[in-house]
């Protein structure tokens, strides 16, 4: 760890970060272009010089602790009331203790999941000149876009990954706006993921002691965003990070990861691997769910390690609108009133998705939580 810190400090001790960021951004070709060009040393903007949020804590070179993240089997929950009660308890326990769990028998065929991974990989492996036509950083009118690091000019460390973004709801792009290599499978996969999301919000509502439709009636499902991440192999993975430590800015995330691994979550001040389980999807709760539950459920920090093998592919579906995402982004959210009492007063003030995302996005992925800003 000390050697890593010295290496970070020693390399190009004087450099113009903003100029390097602009030069990288203006290529519109992402991290993959660097790897395709044969880079052997990562550019300075990717040097991971954060402290305990990234490399120096969490057993970077020794695999993290064996995961105790629960695996929840959804088989039969719509037919068997006793089985449903058991699953509700498992979801409640996982949401309170971990903020993460994996689900199996979730209704999305393995073949669809595999095709989705292939589709995301196929887009990122298109010719750079083709991808440039989809590159966008700040255009809110684009419902499908390609970029590298949404917080490129704000985050302290540039992450070793490229991304496509697809707005599933409320206003998806026209099929002609999405490349043929991935358009059909994105529609198919996100439709099935949305159906799974409905089930998960029912289970979360019931695990809070509420009516199954309570969260959906709060319109938490009106915004749905898919990100397809591409993590190229990194020539110096010990000096970089795939995704910096962060908590998600949504209500709920459904994550499909390939079998390469690298995802870790922070639990009891230790980093735990989230090992890929064939056919499983990773579910995690975001900051807005912790706010709604008044701290009953957890939104926890997680990260993705850079690796010298790859590419790693992951597909994350987020339940929230985008910033300035229409009417739903202006809905006022606060701790659910049915959960509050004299012994359990509200921890957070009310806010909107627009206000929350403005603060979260401006902060960037810096390893700190956005939630304290909204505490009473």
Image: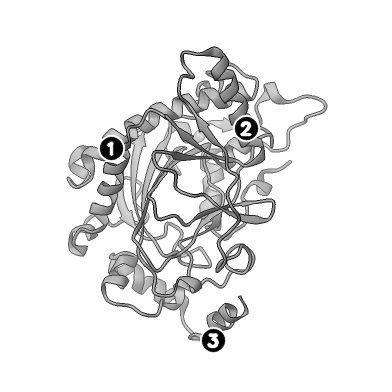
Instruction: Check if mark 3's residue and mark 1's residue have beta carbons within 8 Å.
Output: no
Q: Is residue 334 visible?
A: no
Q: Position of residue 95 (x, y in %)?
A: 61, 35
Q: Is residue 114 above or below residue 79?
A: below
| Labelled disc at residue 246 | none
The C terminus sits in image quarter: top right
Residue beneath disc 3: 10
State the residue position of label 1.
111
x and y, in percent, of residue 149 in the image: 41, 60
Label 2 sits on residue: 292
Which element type, helix, strand or loop, lies under badge 1? helix
Query: So how many labels did they put on this image?
Result: 3
User: Label 1 to label 2, Cα distance in Å?
Assistant: 35 Å
Residue 296 at what x, y percent from top left? 68, 34
- Quarter of the view holding residue 198: top left
Q: Earlier in the sequence, mark 1 or mark 2?
A: 1
């Amino acid at each position: 760890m000390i050697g890593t810190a010295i290496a970070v400090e020693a390399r190009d001790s004087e450099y113009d970060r903003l100029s390097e960021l602009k030069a990288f951004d203006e290529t519109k070709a992402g991290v993959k272009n660097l790897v395709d060009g044969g880079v052997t040393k990562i550019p300075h903007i990717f040097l991971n010089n954060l402290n305990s949020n990234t490399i120096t804590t969490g057993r970077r070179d020794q695999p993290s602790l064996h995961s105790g993240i629960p695996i929840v089997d959804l088989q039969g929950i719509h037919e068997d009331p006793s089985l449903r009660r058991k699953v509700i308890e498992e979801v409640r326990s996982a949401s309170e203790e971990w903020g993460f769990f994996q689900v199996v028998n979730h209704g999305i065929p393995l073949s669809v999941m595999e095709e989705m991974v292939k589709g995301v990989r196929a887009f990122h492996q298109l010719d750079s000149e083709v991808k440039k036509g989809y590159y966008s950083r700040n255009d809110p009118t684009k419902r499908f876009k390609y970029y590298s690091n949404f917080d490129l000019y704000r985050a302290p460390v540039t992450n070793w990954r490229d991304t496509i973004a697809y707005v599933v709801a409320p206003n998806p792009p026209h099929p002609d706006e999405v490349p043929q290599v991935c358009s059909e499978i994105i529609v198919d996969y996100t439709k099935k993921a949305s159906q799974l999301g409905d089930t998960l919000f029912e289970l979360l509502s019931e695990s809070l002691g509420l009516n199954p439709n309570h969260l959906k009636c709060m319109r938490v499902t009106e915004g749905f965003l898919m990100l397809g991440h591409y993590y190229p192999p990194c020539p110096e993975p010990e000096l970089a990070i795939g995704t910096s430590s962060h908590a998600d800015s949504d209500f709920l995330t459904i994550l499909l990861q390939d079998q390469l691994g690298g995802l870790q979550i922070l639990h009891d001040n230790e980093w735990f691997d989230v090992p890929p389980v064939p056919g499983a999807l990773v579910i995690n709760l975001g900051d807005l769910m912790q706010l709604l539950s008044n701290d009953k459920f957890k939104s926890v920090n997680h990260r993705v390690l850079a690796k010298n093998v790859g590419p790693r592919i992951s597909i994350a579906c987020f339940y929230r609108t985008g910033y300035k995402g229409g009417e739903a982004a202006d809905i006022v959210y606060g701790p659910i009133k049915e959960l509050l009492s004299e012994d359990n007063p509200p921890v957070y003030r009310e806010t909107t998705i627009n206000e929350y995302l403005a603060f979260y996005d401006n902060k960037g992925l810096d390893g700190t939580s956005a939630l304290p800003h909204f505490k009473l």
